[in-house]
Image (cartoon, grey):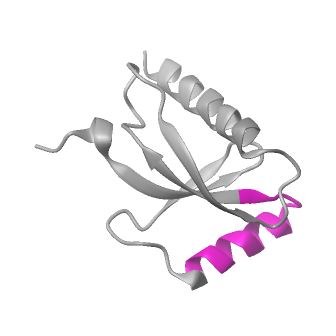
């Protein structure tokens, strides 16, 4: 059994907190990142490539998000996008109760 609280995963984090996971067991390719950046641009959004640590479905602790690089010239700081991510995550967890 693995300790999911220490699991690390790549993600694309948009300015509004929406996110998609990338390469669970490998680093994302430049093509995957470029495709994600184009998708964000099509929605007039910027975002970030980040690494998430923790169990997404655990109610016990906030996940840790580490910025790797910006995508598409985000208009807000990483911390605000991270807070929006956590709000989405909290809402999803509350729907399970």
Query: Front-most of 63 and 57?
Result: 63
Residue drawn at (37%, 27%) of the image: 58
The residue closer to the viewer here, 79 or 23, is 79
Q: Position of residue 9 (x, y in %)?
A: 42, 55
Left or right of 87 on screen, residue 97: left
Q: Is residue 5 left or right of residue 18?
A: left
Q: Is residue 76 left or right of residue 31?
A: right
Looking at the image, which residue sits at the far top?
Answer: 97
Q: Is residue 47 above or below residue 89?
A: below
Kindly identify the residue that appears in the image at 62 percent across and 32 percent down: 88
Residue 33, placed above or below residue 83: below
Q: Which is more toward the observer, 47 or 21? A: 47
Q: As rendered, which of 80 and 44 lies closer to the eye? A: 80
- Quadrant the C terminus occupies: top left
| Residue 15, magenta (yes or no) | no
Residue drawn at (54%, 44%), measured in percent from left and top?
A: 65
Q: Residue at the location (32% across, 47% down)?
A: 7
């Amino acid at each position: 059994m693995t300790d999911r609280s220490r699991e690390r995963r790549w993600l694309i984090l948009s300015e509004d907190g929406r996110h998609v996971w990338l390469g669970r067991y490998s680093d994302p390719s430049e093509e995957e990142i470029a495709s994600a950046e184009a998708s964000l641009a099509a929605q007039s959004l910027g975002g970030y490539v980040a690494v998430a640590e923790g169990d997404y479905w655990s109610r016990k602790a906030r996940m840790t998000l580490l910025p790797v690089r910006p995508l598409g010239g985000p208009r807000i700081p990483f911390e605000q996008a991270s807070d929006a991510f956590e709000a989405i995550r909290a809402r999803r967890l509350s729907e399970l109760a």
